[in-house]
Image: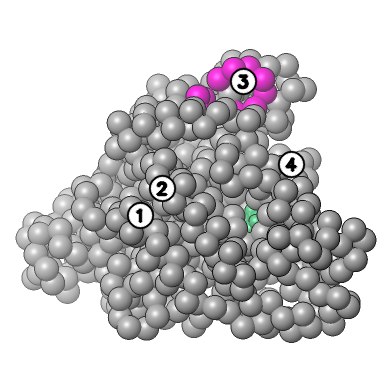
Amino acid sequence: MGDRWYQEAVVYCLDVDTFADSDGDGVGDFQGVIGRLDYLARLGVTCLWLNPIHPSPNEDDGYDATDFYNVDPRLGTLGDFAELLHQASNRGIRVIIDLVVNHTSDQHPWFQSARSSPDSPYRDWYVWADHEPADRHQGMVFPGEQHETWTYDRTAKAWFYHRFYKFQPDLNIENPKVRAEIKKITSFWLQLGVAGFRMDAAPFIIERTEPGNPNSPKDFDFLTDLRQHVQWRRGDAVLLAEANVEPDELPVYFGDGSGSGNRIHMLFDFMLNGRLMLALAREDPEVIIDALRDTPKLPTGGQWATFLRNHDEIDLSKLTADQRNDVLEKFGPDENMQLYGRGIRRRLAPMLGNDRRHIELAYSLQFSLRGTPVLRYGEEIGMGEDLSLDGRDAIRTPMQWSYADNAGFSTAEPEKLVRPVIDKGEYGYQKVNVTAQRKDPRSLLGWFERMIRTLREAPETGSGSTTHIDVVMPPGVLAHRADGRTGTMVFLHNLGTEDVEVDLSTLAPEADLPIDVLSDRNYEDVGKLDRLKLGGYGYRWIRLRRGHER
Ligand code: NOJ
């Protein structure tokens, strides 16, 4: 894999504390992840994204750090982490970590010092106001759980700004010392061997907060600066950022407009995520076609990161009210399945009624569209959620490894587990676990392994250009193609339940000898592409041509 390794990567996201517990204390740890690297390598993962690993009171699942230069002792030592990097690298797996520098925990020594006195050297590391700002009740990210973005601190005798929960005070990006510190944090982890960062809350990091102004200006130069710094320290390091903003605002996150991608390498495609959900709910690919047509052209080196599930709620806020309602009605009808008035706190398998065909279709679609696919742990075996847990914790239950107690996640007493394992019903570990699926080549896990292997053989998928094939299609069917250095792939996806026949013979003259490389069942040979059968929820990956630039 070349310099732009991230364009051909398969990223797997996991929370160390719920993945695998090696020492039986009920909390997953680095040694536990090391023990499962062969599993990840076999699955075809080439990049691990670890959710926050720093010491933290864990009031927001680690997104509230108290020390950026260390690891949470619950997960192991820095030595264990370095060993994980080494062992992962032995298997060709890169590791990226969350960079959560929009804010710290309010327990961070910097904030403790800052609040203690106006003369503290850290006072200006945070964002303060002497009087109650007019936008105090605006801009909340977690409506319902969060009631303000400015909170009065009695010790500090001032108001401090927090985009997220009030225990997460925002760092002051205008302060050059804060900027220097953020760079130092990235240097530290790059020196240790991480391959890059998943940058949390990018739009808020660069906010030059003005009390009373809910639309404070942003300093994009900081992204250019940070990118340069990171790249000097490690040439192939990658920045993968979360910027859930309007599509027309996205290009400036990738680059300054000069044509080169000199800011963030990869951005999560939140817009596509919402549209994929809508397309699946309506059994109609129209919004995906729109997305392929409308997404802004990326500067050189820019890349999308696609996902169906991540560690948060599925955010449907970019859909219209009608569209959102359609998705909620289909995939999250109960109030208890919804969150923040905009999203769904469920995993994909239960949303799709555990219909194997539908799950394969959804992931086939994600992995065949442009961008680098990101997969959340447990999705590859079709895990479910626990709606009795609070908020986003519903989908943060321990990985289900086997039939053993606690799903093989830990040998601790069940009450000591970081979160309960799912042990009842259709998604209980007795029915859904890695051991069972590893033995069965027809399992969902077996399918993911095959699908990812096929993807590896067709690197133009994801890294090349992706276009909608604009020919008359039966309702519910999406045809798209990927073109790149390694050739051309054509993909058919039937989002509806009816069997159909598709005519793609207009593509035939340019084909070498088209062949099916992945499909939901055994279809007749591709032939002249004029009578391609496609079952309900069916999909076909067809190699059209090898190795010519279009
Ligand atoms: C976005 C993360 O995805 C989310 O989990 C976290 O709560 C907030 N940023 C705050 O860091």
Q: Is residue 173 left or right of residue 486?
A: right
* Residue 55 image label: none
Q: In the image, which is nearer the foreground, mark 4 or mark 1?
A: 1
Q: Is mark 1 within 8 Å of ligand 1?
A: no
- Asked whether 431 or 90 is in front, the reply is 90
Q: Position of residue 149 (x, y in %)?
A: 79, 69
Mark 4 or mark 1, earlier in chain: 4
Which residue is drawn at the image coordinates 34% and 39% (left, top)? 93
**Cα distance, mark 4 to mark 1?**
31 Å
- Asked whether 114 or 33 is in front, the reply is 114
Prevailing secondary structure of the magenta residues: loop
Position of the C terminus by quadrant: bottom left
* Residue 57 image label: 4
Residue matched to label 2: 190
Dot 4, how many residues are within 10 Å of its Cα: few (below 14), some (14-19), or many (20+)? some
Residue matched to label 1: 233
**Cα distance, mark 3 to mark 4?**
22 Å
Q: Position of residue 246 (x, y in %)?
A: 55, 78
The kind of residue tagged 1 is Arg
The kind of residue tagged 2 is Leu
| Disc 1, SS | helix
Residue matched to label 3: 410
Q: Position of residue 345 (x, y in %)?
A: 68, 52
Mark 2 or mark 4, earlier in chain: 4
Q: In the image, which is nearer the foreground, mark 1 or mark 3?
A: 1
| Disc 3, SS | loop
